[in-house]
Amino acid sequence: MHISRRSFIKATAASGIAAAFGGLGLSLVPSVSQAKLLPLRWAKQTTSVCCFCAVGCGLLVHTDKTSHRAVNVEGNPDHPVNEGSLCSKGASIYQVAENAERPATPMYRAPYSDAWQPVSWDWALTEIARRIKKDRDASFRFQNDMGLTVNRCDGIASVGSAALDNEECWVFQSILRALGLVWIEHQARICHSSTVPALAESFGRGAMTNHWNDIQHSDCVLVMGSNAAENHPISFKWVLRAMEKGAKLISIDPRFTRTSAKADLYVQIRAGTDIAVLGGLINYIIENDLIQRDYVVSHTNAPFLVSDSFSFKDGLFSGYKAGSKDSHYQGRYNKSLWDFAKDENGLPLKDETLAHPRCVYQLLKKHYSRYDIDTVVSVSGADKQGLLEFYRQYAATGKPDKAGTIMYAMGWTQHTVGTQYIRTMAMVQLLLGNIGVAGGGVNALRGESNVQGSTDHALLWQSLPGYLAVPDATHTSYKKHLEIKTAPHLAAAKDPKSAAWWQYYPKYMASFLKSMYPQAELADAYNWLPKADQGKTYTWLELFDAMHDGEFKGFFAWGQNPACSGAHAGKNREAMAKLDWMVNVNIFDNETGSFWRGPGMQPEKIKTEVFFLPCCVSIEKEGSITNSGRWMQWRYAGPDPRGAARSDGHIMVELMEKVRALYAEEGGTFTAPIEALSLDMWRDQKGYNPHNVARLINGTFLRDVTIKGTTYKKGQQVPSFALLQDDGSTCSGNWLYCASYTDEGNMGERQSRQQSPEQEKLGLFPNWTWCWPLNRRILYNRASCDLTGKPYNPQMPVISWTGEKWTGDVPDGGWKPGEKYSFIMKPHGHGRIYGPGLEDGPFPEHYEPMETPLKSHPLSRQRSNPACLSFNDEYKAVADPKFPYVATTFRVTEHWQTGLMTRHMPWLLEAQPQMFVELSEELARKLGVGNGDKVVVESARGSIWAVGMVTERVKPLRILGKTVHQISMPWCFGWFMPHDGSGGDSSNLLTAAVGDANTGIPETKVFMANVRKA
Ligand code: SF4
């Protein structure tokens, strides 16, 4: 099976699949389908959605009616986002499906073996089911060390997957939780987990606020912490469209990218200093009185008074306690000290003049007054004039008729202060009145096609679908859990203007429990949920640390490649050798499935049994995925599954049926959740059925229910989450998706471009697929109007009040203007400039990355985030001459994430064949490295080879009077493919296992490294 890259490219190019390609790239002119020009007589046409990034471009897939193989994939010209265009990855999708490298059968690697052996599906699933049962039963804990009920399986862990469809994600989380797992993680942890608490703390929901088409309405597009032109190429079409209408594009980045090349203004900064730069922007806005005052007073918590127990000194907020030697966190805060000052009803005191010294606005002003331009320049290395121009241009959007937007991605999320990076910009947007409006928002550019949906459907340890909470063991009963979760919202609801929407948590939790266990009493179903230990987190880095310590017997790596994707990937590879068994489900064999034969491994010493299960590619199966803009889009099956491949949903259902059968036959530990699981509802006679699951996710009336005079019959679909009940009479697998699959049909399948003139002006496309929540395309849209319902910008109204009703987008609650506050998911109904719910402070503060060239910085005496996740036994390079260069990682257009799929696609591999490192001309001269020379890049954790690319894209910076060099590398390569090793290995072998204080997302975007000639 091992062939060289060159012969692989030739072989696949000669495979005889004829493909006709439609629009490619960034043309602003919608393309015309080849199929419309030349009707395909011998092919069937299906629509699908690109399986790579979360722009969610629409596809037309043509499948030969005789061979049932894909013969053409092109952009769907009717699709509102891509209008027929595709980037290089989307345009090459057929090469994923029609690829001779796809394993034809399941494979098994026996302990200490040096080879795979092909096996049958029945054998593989039976053997996996036996191991699940054995190790679940052996490691099951009914109580924790405190004697509290936990009902969980500690011996098995799972990662994956944002590559699954929504329905598969929901099924997978149900199976894992019915088995009792709490170690549940996936890509979202390591790419965008910091987005969720940052945006939820600021606005109420953890998702991109606007959507792709809306970017065209912006007057100023800030691209910072992302490189949209290369990594979300079709999204950039909407940036260019905004620029055609006069918008400015600003690019702030450690390296000059293709986004920078199109920008009106580019400013280079040192990786890891974005909070300093944005803190300077807040200072500039306040100093020059550029806030949108009516918006700030009406819609944000700037007027709220803060308790006297809140303070900030020398880089620490009040209430800090350093972590113990055994803790994975550097320290923790007592957040209760950061609360608001409250009246006798427990509601925040306010000063709408914004003059009170304890009001949020004045505290904000004081906090960021330290971020003066010279200090920011000295820390970040930015050009002073460039920075001032950035501040001037962006702050100009703080006017009612202007809108500025931010597009960010992993350049912001992957830091030990990642959550606070995003918070800083959320605060800027609130000060400028840019949330809820057209062309505004905080737009998280999700990198995986369904990372939004997989997060919504809770493949993460801490949440249940719809962002309900995984209970901790101190929530000793269902009643207590509900009381704890609703208390702050019920308290806030004493203010009649506060919708405090999470007060309805019991309805969503009851409906979720009923979706997993329809016949059970709610208290029993709650008891069956596995419980976390209070105060403990089960995040990605901790999962692999526990695996490295030998704590797990079994492991699922489902649609994920942690041998390359995670920080300190070498530790992950070592950790897998400590397992008894591992299941790897994927399209291609990869660095994870074959870890035992990777570089430095000795198969004869590795006991881990590995099962590789080949799954379908996206165009071979049916189901929905949710793009970054929250559009739930249905995909249809085109070609048949190649070889013996099965859809992930089929694999999950068959595996769980085998597990259930074993328990029925033999008995075992804590069998009730396995027996009672709604497994039979997920299938039809042929097996897994995504429509059945999608209906269950939406929810159904389980008995006749009369609500406000209307009777809903048992078996009817619940039309809206407003009708879900807390008494067990409704089920809904995910309340956020309630209204997505009603008695009218599957809303995600809709493909009508019909819209009202008002909606057309905004490009809302309300009849194209469906969007959570309730098909609302722009979140927090009540904040786009003043308290009388008049849009701040009447030229571009998102919603407006006619005197009787709202028109435009679906409003964030249908109440009359002024009747309720606009940020309905927050307890007090206001956008949070002051965010007391985060683990590392209510105001973002600049801290150095955990690896840094500086021993100290001028903003405080606290060098790094005092609350971050960090393992005490791992070395961090701080001002270490052995690792003198600031290193960062990035993606290229041609490869996607670890490159697992794209390195198997000949056209893309040809375009980007191997690992390289970008070096400035100055650094290259210093090292004696020429363009194209092979170099070794090394960090405190490992080393890799790379081709030196000497470029003007990076320049040395002056930081606190010293010259600092930066280097940058892609992270899309791995040893497995190309098979001849010509691609190199993952740059995550170099990155540090340190994580954000709120989410544990690894700091893969900055570390210290050395470069030398090979
Ligand atoms: S990778 Fe992203 S931008 Fe490219 S075609 Fe796919 S969805 Fe569109």
Image (spheres, rainbow, N blue to C red):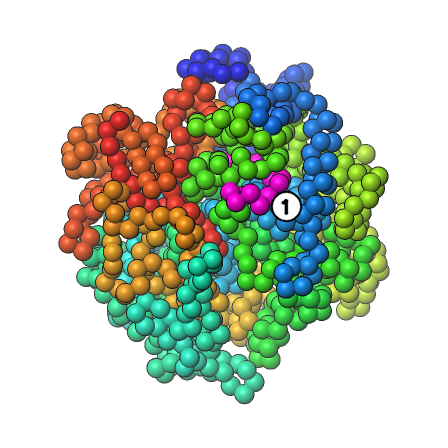
| Residue 389 seen anywhere in this rendered image of the structure | no
Using the image, determine if residue 579 lies above or below residue 251: above
Residue at the extreme front of the image, as rendered = 605
Look at 34% across and 77% down and name the residue there.
362
Look at 28% across and 51% down and name the residue there.
878
Q: Position of residue 592 (x, y in %)?
A: 52, 32
How crowded is the residue under tag 1: few (<14 C-alpha within 10 Å), some, or many (20+)?
Answer: many
Q: Position of residue 214 (x, y in %)?
A: 46, 50
**Secondary structure category for the residue under label 1:** loop
Q: Position of residue 253 (x, y in %)?
A: 30, 47
Residue at the extreme bottom of the image, as rendered = 344
Using the image, determine if residue 289 lies above or below residue 451: below
Look at 45% across and 40% down and name the residue there.
571
Look at 23% across and 65% down and name the residue there.
372
Image quadrant in which you'd find residue 462? bottom right
Magenta stretch encompasses residue 558 = yes
Residue flagged by tag 1: what amino acid is it?
Gly
Query: In the depicted view, which residue is nearer to us: 457 or 310?
Result: 310
Specify whether 607 is left or right of 314: right
Residue segment shown in magenta: 547-562
- Which quadrant is home to the C terminus? top left
Magenta stretch encompasses residue 418 = no
User: Which residue corresponds to mark 1?
Assistant: 155
Q: Is mark 1 within 8 Å of ligand 1?
A: no
| Residue 131 seen anywhere in this rendered image of the structure | yes
Task: Count the marks.
Answer: 1
Using the image, determine if residue 885 lies above or below residue 711: above
Specify whether 469 is left or right of 53: right
Q: Position of residue 502 (x, y in %)?
A: 61, 67
Query: In the depicted view, which residue is nearer to us: 302 or 195?
Result: 195
